[in-house]
Image: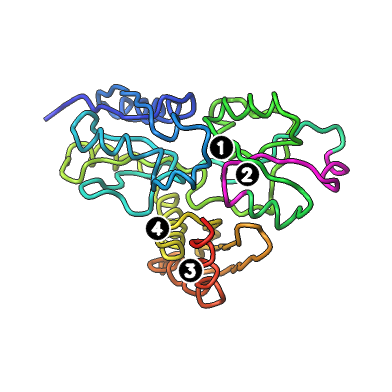
Amino acid sequence: MTKTIRIGTRDSELALWQANTVKNKLENLGYTSELVPVKSTGDLILDQPLYELGITGIFTKTLDVAMIKGEVDIAVHSMKDVPTLLPNGIVQAAVLERAAVKDILVHKSDDLHADLTQPKTIATGSLRRKAQWLHRYENHEVVDLRGNVNTRMQKLEDSDWLGAIFAQAGLERINIKPENHIELDWMIPAPAQGAMVIAAMENDVFCKEACAKLNDEESEICTRIEREFLRTLEGGCTAPIGALATVEGDEIRFIGALFSLDGKTKIELERTMRFSDYEGFGKACAKEILADGGAELMQKIKEQL
C-alpha cells in the first residue's frame, strides 16, 4: 500500500521549516507527502502568558484534533512543546537528530557585562527561563513575551528591554540568530529542547513504519529521560523545570533542576548512568528532587499558578 502522508504543522516560519525538513527526509526515502498548515490556540492568543491559559499542550492540541479527525496523518512538533502524556490513540513515531540545546540571550547592549549588573528588563514567556534568570540576576525584572520566533524578535526590537531569551536551535533553523547574542551556558534547558518529534496515530502502521526510519536513537533516549523526569516532577502542573541528558562514551550524564517561581529556591542534581541501564533513570532523578524538598515546592507552585 502507498499513500500521500499528510503532515500537520503550525504555520509559523519555524514550524514550517521543521515540517519541510520531515517532508524532505520522507521523500528522500521514496514516500510522497504534503504539508497541511494549521493555526494553534497558542498562536492565536498572544495577550496572556502560556501558563495562564490552563491548557496542556496548547501548541499541539489543534494538530492532535486534526489527526484524530483524519485531516492529517502525522504532526511535527518542537518536542519541548509536547505534553509528556499523549492523547489516547496518538503515539511518538520518531525523534529526529537533536540540534543545539542551549538558550541564548539576544541583547541590545554595547557593554553587556556592565548592563547585567544594573537593574534591567529581560523578556521571556517561559517560567523556567524566568526563574533561572531571577535566580542569577535578582535585581532584574522579567516580562512576558509571546508569539512565534519572528514576532518575539520584532517585539524585542521595538522595546526598551535589555534583551530576550530564545532557544538557540529555533533561531538557527530559520537563520535569524543575530550577532548580538550570548549563549547562556549556566541555564538548564527545557526537557527535549532542540529536538523535533513526529506524532502519528497508533493504528496507522504505514506512517509509523515510514517515520521510524527517521528516528535517531541517541536523541530519542536522551529526550525520553528528560521527559520522564518532567512527568514525574510536575504531575500535570506547569513549573520551572530544566533537564538535560547527554551521552558521554558509554554513560549518560543528567542534570535536572526545579526552581521556585521567583527563582529564589533551586533544587538541582547531577547524575550519571551507564547507557545500557537508562530505563527509569529520569524517574529516579525526579524522585530524588521530590525527596529533597521538591514535593513541597511543587505544591507551593500549584497554589501560586
Query: In the image, what residue type sits under mark 3?
Result: Ala
Indicate left or right for 234 with 297 as reference: left
The quarter of the picture where residue 96 lies is top left
Q: Which mark is residue 236?
A: 4
Point out the stretch of residues depicted in magenta: 112-129
Viewer-nearest of discs 3 and 1: 3
Mark 2 or 3 closer to N-term?
Answer: 2
- Mark 2 Cα within 10 Å, few/some/many (few <14, many 20+)? many
**Circle 1 residue:** 169
| Residue at x-position 49% and y-position 28% | 14
Reply yes or no: does residue 117 show up in magenta: yes
Mark 3 — residue?
286
Q: Residue at x 86, y 32 (%)?
A: 110
Front-most of residues 125 and 198: 125
Q: Which residue is mark 2?
A: 103
Front tag of 4 and 3: 4
**Disc 4, SS:** loop
118 shown above or below 38 = below
Dot 3: element: helix
Query: Residue 300, how many percent across, how many down?
Result: 54, 66
